[in-house]
């Protein structure tokens, strides 16, 4: 039995596409070229193979994703994952929330932040820096136009540099968009769960 998931957890589920992914053996030369730069430079997922139907978008999306989430400098990798977790919670993207929570916990060697967020959501109490990062990511995902100069000041007061603030804006905006796309294209599932 397969069950579509509705609860946040760090246990990363499978993602089942609703649109048939491109098969590598059937891919065009343009699709294969776009697929060479996969997010995080890892294996080609069903999600990326689904996006390969629009090769022009994928050819831009993957390098952008890698630059935002993995480039050196600015916010730490763990903080970028926290920035991506905010929109994933707002958008109820079970798959993305699990991926970013799992990565954050592994990078930090600690599950307390993601435990608190999954237990209490936006009411979780975190360290001042993590709280400022999550609050901004959550608020900007709900209504980007409501991010104010005061929100920027709260990030600075928590110790974020201008470069780190830009990284946060980029990571949270990227996943505000990606969550919505993933919802329409497929579902988070667990096989064999009743």
Image (cartoon, rainbow, N blue to C red):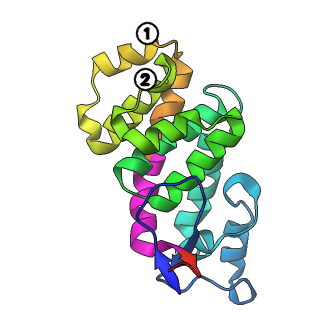
Residue 114 position within the rendered picture, expressed as x and y whole percent measured from the top left: 53, 40
Residue 106 position within the rendered picture, expressed as x and y whole percent measured from the top left: 70, 42
Residue 22 occupies quadrant: bottom right
* Residue where numbered disc 1 is placed: 157
Residue 49 seen in render: yes
Label 2 Cα crowd, 10 Å radius (few <14 / some 14-19 / many 20+):
many
Q: Nearer the viewer, residue 156 or 126?
A: 126
Secondary structure found at label 2? helix
What's the magenta region? 174-189
Q: Nearer the viewer, residue 42 or 7?
A: 7
Which dot marks residue 132? 2
Mark 2 to mark 1 CA distance (whole Å): 9 Å
Return the residue found at the far bottom.
26
Secondary structure found at label 1? helix
Residue 191 in the figure: left or right of residue 88: right
Residue 171 seen in render: no
Residue 78 occupies quadrant: top right
Give me the residue at 46% from left, 28% from top. 133
Give me the residue at 57% from left, 41% from top. 81
Give me the residue at 66% from left, 70% from top. 45
């Amino acid at each position: 039995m397969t069950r579509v998931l509705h609860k946040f957890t760090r246990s990363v589920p499978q993602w089942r596409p609703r649109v048939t992914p491109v098969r590598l053996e059937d891919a065009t030369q343009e699709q294969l070229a776009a697929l060479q730069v996969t997010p995080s430079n890892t294996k080609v997922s069903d999600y990326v193979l689904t996006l390969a139907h629009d090769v022009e978008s994928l050819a831009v999306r993957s390098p952008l994703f890698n630059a935002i989430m993995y480039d050196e400098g600015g916010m730490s990798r763990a903080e970028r994952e926290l920035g991506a977790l905010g929109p994933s919670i707002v958008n109820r993207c079970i798959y993305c929330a699990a991926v970013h929570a799992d990565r954050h916990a592994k990078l930090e060697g600690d599950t307390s932040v993601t435990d608190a967020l999954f237990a209490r959501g936006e009411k979780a109490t975190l360290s001042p820096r993590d709280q400022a990062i999550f609050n901004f990511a959550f608020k900007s995902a709900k209504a980007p136009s409501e991010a104010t100069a005061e929100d920027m000041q709260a990030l600075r007061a928590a110790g974020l540099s201008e470069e780190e603030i830009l990284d946060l804006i980029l990571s949270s905006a990227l996943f505000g968009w990606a969550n919505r796309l993933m919802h329409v294209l497929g579902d988070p599932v667990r096989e064999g769960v009743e």
